[in-house]
Every structure is written in C-alpha cells, then in structure tokens.
Image (cartoon, grey):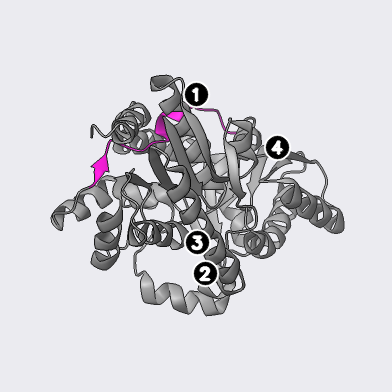
C-alpha cells in the first residue's frame, strides 16, 4: 500500500514517523511519501516537499508564507490526484492540511483521508469539527475532542494518545545538590519562538547559575539553523557549562529538569518523567488575537488533560528571567510532586497500544475495509 503523509512542523513530523513505523509493522511492503523534513527522510519517506520554515506563530507571521503555501497546496492536491495513494494522512498543521483536504474533495478525489490531530482540539469549534468530518476521517489523541465530536454526532476515531507509549518514564531521581544540577533548555523550533524565548531562558540560566555555581545546561536544537542561532546567542551572552544537542530526547536524557516552550516538547518531558517549567511568549498583537479565540485557563498539554497546573506556565510578561529561575530552583529542590502527577497523566492519555491501534485503523482505511 502507498501512503502520503502531510506534516508542517517538527511535532507533526514526529507523529508522522511514529505512525508510519507502526503501519510498516502491519504492512511490511508499505511505501511512504509526503511533506516533511529530515526526520521523515531518515525514516524512509520520499519527500514530495520539505516543510522547513513553514511553521509560524499566529496569523500575522503567517501572511508572508501564504502565497507559497497556497501554491504548494494546489500542487500537492494535483500530485495526489495523479498518483492516487491508498491513504492520505494529514498530521496536525490544520491551516494547510484542512485546505488540502477540501481542495482534494473539490477536485473529485475519492480516496480515504485520515486527519491525525485535527485542528481546534481544545476550542470546541462546531464549524471546524464539521469541516474536518466533511472531508476526512478525524483521528484524535484526546478524549476531550472525541467527546466533542460525538456530541455533534460526527465521526471520529480515538484510541488514546499516539505518542504516549513512545516514551518510557525514568525512575524518580533525588533532588540534585543545592549548588548543582543539570537543566535542559528547549526554546522551541520556530524562528519566532527562538527570538522571544532564548534571551529569557539564557538569562534565567545565568541567574540560576549564580545560585547554583555547579549548574550545567543542555540546549536542544530542532535543526541546523536553530543550533546555529542558539550557539551564537550563548556566545554573545558568555554562558558557561552549556552543551548543544539535537532534539528533545537527547536534551532531557541526563537532565534533572527542563525549561520548555509550550508544545509537544512539554508532553515529551512529562512522558519521560522529566520535571518541567513551561513558558511561551508571543507578540502583543498576537496576544489580542489569542484572547479572542481562546479563553481557557491552561495551554500546556499535561495541564489541559488533567485540568490542573501540573507544569508551571510562565506566559508573556510572567516569563521573566527571575521568575523562570525561581520556578526552576523550586522544581530542582522538590521534583517528586510533579513526577507523581506525570504518572497520572500517562494513565489519562489512554491505553499503551494506542499507536498500534491507530496504525491498524489506518491500514484498514487504506484497504477500504474500515
């Protein structure tokens, strides 16, 4: 069977490769093509388009990218019509992928389309849910979204969180000595995230190192460009005892705790049993937009799933170096409470075979048997 995956940023690519690997166990002759980047290429995908640089923070930042993305969307729809894969899998990145699915249906594409991590997970938007269900089979990783679709009598598949079993919770660690510790710094993958987060995080590390002289940091970079940006910033700030690695897993492997930009990386820390402090900063213009579309209390996945503040969230003006250093110092002194909450989170994310069940569902769709 032939599968076409469309992802738009690092977190979607992570889910895409995990699902493809699980599909391959059931369909060993499977062929994978799609929109992705280095991770998908390394995992056997033939890349139709590289999505590097596509992700943006909010509608204003997206405007310059719209013409290129629209052209890519039309070209991709035409490519899919010509090649007729057995299954099209859209992974997150709803602004592009939902339009792609609509375009495919508009030009007469009849094949199955699976929308993994459909948009508006926590917003409960009826219009968006109906738009997704009209053109694709939604596959959610969250019980909350499953329940919302079902309340509208819309089809949706749910087996649990697809990535939960990809991570093993390490054994709880004792608090490091009061003058010591290893912290991971995960500022995000988008250019705008680096611009807003890196100065605050590096200043927070410098401040915390003044309290803990033996403190060390491991900085996780999403790609080559991000690593270059991070190294240059660290050099300008004169930071000491800082190592640079690629990706979340390597950054947190030996860390006592992590500062993390809100997103999938927070969930990765939680599922790995690594205590975390989350931050997120956007432009003032985007703050007003965000207030119009979202009024929830939390933004990080562990807090949204458990409906309480498990991971400290320092957002906007609250994400000062002093506040970030203070929150991290508290976490290093007492990591056990958060670790216990992470164990509850794993249970709340559903059964451990969610990825395998989702892969079996995808194969059935590809074979026309679902």
Asked whether residue 331 appears in the rendered view, the answer is yes
**Disc 1 marks which residue?**
171
Upstream in sequence: badge 1 or badge 2: 2
Badge nearest the viewer, 1 or 3: 3
Q: CA distance from mark 2 to mark 4?
A: 38 Å
Query: Is 304 located above or below residue 112 in the figure?
Result: below
**Disc 4 marks which residue?**
180
Upstream in sequence: badge 1 or badge 3: 3
Upstream in sequence: badge 1 or badge 4: 1
Badge nearest the viewer, 1 or 2: 2
The residue located at (46%, 29%) in the rendering is: 166
Q: Residues within 10 Å of mark 4 (few under 14, many from 20)?
A: some
Q: Is residue 238 shown left or right of residue 91? A: right
Image spot of residue 302 (x, y percent): 40, 46
SS at mark 2 in the image: loop
Badge nearest the viewer, 4 or 3: 3
Upstream in sequence: badge 2 or badge 4: 2
Q: CA distance from mark 1 to mark 2?
A: 38 Å
Badge nearest the viewer, 2 or 3: 3
Asked whether residue 176 appears in the rendered view, the answer is no
SS at mark 3 in the image: helix
**Disc 2 marks which residue?**
58
**Disc 3 marks which residue?**
74
Q: Are marks 2 and 4 in contact (CB under 8 Å)?
A: no
């Amino acid at each position: 069977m032939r599968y076409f995956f469309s992802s738009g940023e690092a977190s979607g690519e992570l889910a895409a490769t995990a699902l493809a690997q699980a599909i391959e166990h059931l369909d060993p002759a499977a062929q994978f093509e799609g929109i992705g980047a280095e991770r998908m290429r390394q995992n056997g995908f033939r890349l139709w388009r590289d999505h590097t640089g596509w992700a943006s923070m909010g509608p204003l930042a997206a405007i310059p990218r719209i013409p290129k993305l629209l052209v890519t969307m039309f070209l991709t729809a035409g490519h899919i019509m010509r090649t007729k894969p057995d299954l099209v899998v859209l992974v997150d990145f709803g602004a592009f992928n939902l339009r792609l699915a609509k375009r495919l249906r508009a030009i007469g594409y009849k094949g199955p389309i699976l929308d993994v991590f459909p948009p508006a997970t926590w917003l409960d938007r009826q219009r968006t849910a109906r738009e997704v269900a009209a053109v694709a089979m939604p596959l959610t990783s969250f019980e909350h979204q499953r329940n919302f679709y079902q309340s509208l009598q819309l089809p949706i598949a749910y087996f649990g969180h697809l990535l939960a079993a990809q991570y093993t919770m390490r054994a709880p660690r004792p608090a490091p000595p009061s003058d010591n510790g290893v912290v991971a710094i995960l500022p995000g993958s988008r250019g705008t995230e680096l611009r807003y987060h890196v100065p605050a995080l590096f200043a927070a590390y410098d401040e915390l190192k003044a309290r803990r002289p033996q403190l060390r940091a491991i900085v996780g970079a999403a790609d080559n460009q991000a690593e270059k940006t991070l190294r240059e910033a660290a050099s300008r700030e004169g930071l000491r005892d800082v190592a640079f690695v690629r990706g979340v897993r390597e950054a947190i492997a030996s860390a006592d705790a992590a500062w993390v930009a809100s997103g999938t990386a927070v969930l990765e820390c939680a599922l790995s049993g690594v205590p975390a402090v989350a931050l997120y900063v956007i432009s003032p213009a985007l703050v007003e937009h965000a207030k119009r579309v979202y009024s929830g209390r939390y933004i990080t996945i562990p807090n949204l799933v458990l409906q309480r503040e498990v991971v400290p969230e320092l957002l906007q003006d609250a994400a000062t170096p002093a506040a970030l250093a203070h929150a991290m110092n508290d976490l290093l002194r007492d990591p056990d409470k958060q670790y216990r909450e992470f164990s509850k989170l794993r249970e709340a994310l559903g059964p451990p075979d969610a990825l395998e069940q989702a892969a079996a569902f995808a194969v059935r769709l590809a074979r026309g048997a679902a």
